[in-house]
Amino acid sequence: MSSSSTPDSLREDANRLALDEVEEAEELSRQRRPGSEEALGEGGDGGRGSGWVTAALAAPGLIWIGFYLLAPLVIIVLVSFWTWTDAGFDKTFTTANYSELFHDSTYWDNMLSTVITSAIAVVACLVLGFPVAYFLALKVQSLRVQIALFIIALAPFWTSFLTRAIAWTFPLMGREGALNQLLVKLHVISEPISEFGFSTLSVRLAMIQLYILFMITPLFFTLAQVDRSALEAARDLGANWWGAFREVILPQTMPGIVIGSIFIFVLTMGDYGTVATVGGGNITSVGTLIYSKIGAVQYPQGAASAVLLVVVLMVGVWVITRLSNLREEL
Amino acid sequence: MEEQGVETGGAAGAAPPTNQSGLDLIGLTKVFPGGTVAVDDVNLHVDHGEYVVLLGPSGCGKTTTLRMIGGHEFPTQGEILLDGQSLVDLPPHKRPTTTVFQHFALFPHRTTLQNVEFGLKMHGVKKDERREAAMRALDMVGLVPLADRKPNALSGGQQQRVALARVLVTKPKALLLDEPLGDLDRLLQLRMRVELRNLQRQLGLMFIHVTHNQEEALSMADRIVVMNDARIQQVADPLTIATKPATEVVARFMGDNNILRGVVKAHEGDRLIIEGDEQHLRVSVHAPGDGRAIGSPAMISVRAAAVTVEANGSGDGLNSAECEIVFVEFLGDLVKLHLLAGDERMLAKVGAEHYPSLRGREGERIRISWKEDDVQLLDA
């Protein structure tokens, strides 16, 4: 005991010497190995004058991004500053669409409720999806079983989105639906509650089920890469389950959490299919608003709404990444 | 405390530990689901301050044994006592042991300092206090200047030292090292052997080190435990392991041993005369009290390094052989002769000074001999 509790006595010159020798040995072994830096250097030299080649290689990707991503965005932004008349677009620059939107309380009410729906979906998918991904990646030992279970988890997603969305209307949440029947059987309620169906509640519940896989998948892949020996080391050094989880698993899983959260946030914010189907026309969101504006050929109005949505999305994504950084700094 | 320990040992129904201080493995057995017996009835006592190396080929059960001591595997049977107290039912974090894992298992998102202070943080030590202790541990391994680096910005040897500092800071009673030098390149391995052994001497801690590298075991251990096929083959100090292997498995695993199967031909006082099955070799071995009958099988080994090319004129044909040189292998400081005595393959390791006279003599015949003292009777 006494010998192990006096680290001060350990600092002896002999040890120091040994350490210096280790450094020296490492230096030597580094020299013996043909340095990776050299190889890199050669690569760099070879790249001289090859700017055109790089450009040529990058071209298909750039064209693709330009055509499918940048051009539509630019056009939408342009249109949002135009006016629609019976004769077509009036291309005089105007901010009228925006000022109108800023004073449109319906739009902002919908924006708020959509943000809340998205936030609920992100948090619920994370809370519900994490244990699933954790179990799949860390508790199941055999890779074969892991993949089999993962495919089974995917199974509901083999059916079409619409089928699953419709399941959340009459069959699950309707007056005669599964939820009402269950609650009546359990004597939680005496009469079926018809408000379950086509409600904000049913839309929000449906969102969680419809999108949870976008959380489970990145979580599963990041969890599967968690260094298990580091996990064992944490337990060995005195961490209980929670300590090991917080110190080893969570930091290593953060990329998966961020990616999953961004996926779900972006997808649910722009969602109008679920809202239209599950909400059955009673419920609106920013997505359905834009959809109805386009339907009513108010293109500039729709475009302005869409641009504002993108701005809100960017703020949301920024918040998500900030939250994850915050954790790192703690 | 100690009294209680005796009772625990007795209650387990296994052989009670002879010494309450130190680590005792009693009848330790691990059967994996599926029926693979990884560790079979291992009994071992390790003293505090002792450097013990578990040596064996991969799959021999050495790592599983270490993991059971550390609490990362649960024994199917048997008892693990540290200072008389059973560890079996304790999770890893409640055991006074810590493990240095094979690939260091550092936390990639934490700096060197954070890695080292982790154990103290988990034990609820206050921030200032654990910082100080961690810096002391880092100073011990000479890594203070790199305290703020993340593991991926460190070299292999530096990572190794972070892993050491990280476990030492928790002041374990026993340090368990799983192939601690396996990830380092050879030159660094050689240096780290010395460093690790120095550190252990200064700390006076019990180190249990797992490796498959014979040379590493010989150079570092106070005692070597050779394991094969889930069982302990031999427990002895490095010199004994190297010169007096107890079983054929040990003799083969340690390498460069001439192993000869034969039958007992005669008893001459304390000596046993054994003739090889191929009848080209006759060997005498000092074996007082060995009562095996004439004609019963026997196996012996002679170290290649104990074989000389100068004829030791005993004249009776014992402990010498006429061989054909198959290959002369020059190893810098010595020469390894690959020989054939009849159909029996033999090895001789002689000093480099013999190289000029041996070079290019493949196909020729040579007389080799060895001393009776260098003949080791093996258990089957």
Image (cartoon, coloured by chain):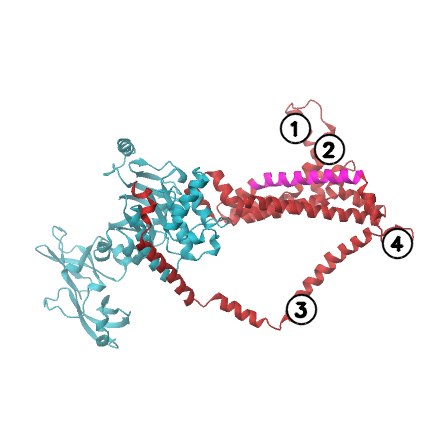
Chain colours: A red, B cyan
Residue found at the very far right of the displayed protein: A87
| Residue B9 x %, y % | 28, 34
Dot 4 corresponds to which residue?
A90
| Label 1 SS | helix
Disc nearer the start of the sequence (3/2)? 3
Horizontal side, residue A175 vs residue B55: left or right = right
Q: Tell if the residue under mark 1 belongs to the same chain as the one under mark 4.
A: yes
* Pointers 4 and 3 in contact (C-beta within 8 Å): no
Dot 2 corresponds to which residue?
A197
How far, Cα to Cα, is label 1 from label 4?
57 Å
Dot 3 corresponds to which residue?
A56
Residue B298 among those drawn in magenta:
no
Region in magenta:
A105-130
Label 1: chain? A
Quarter placement of the N terminus of chain B:
top left
How far, Cα to Cα, is label 4 from label 3?
39 Å
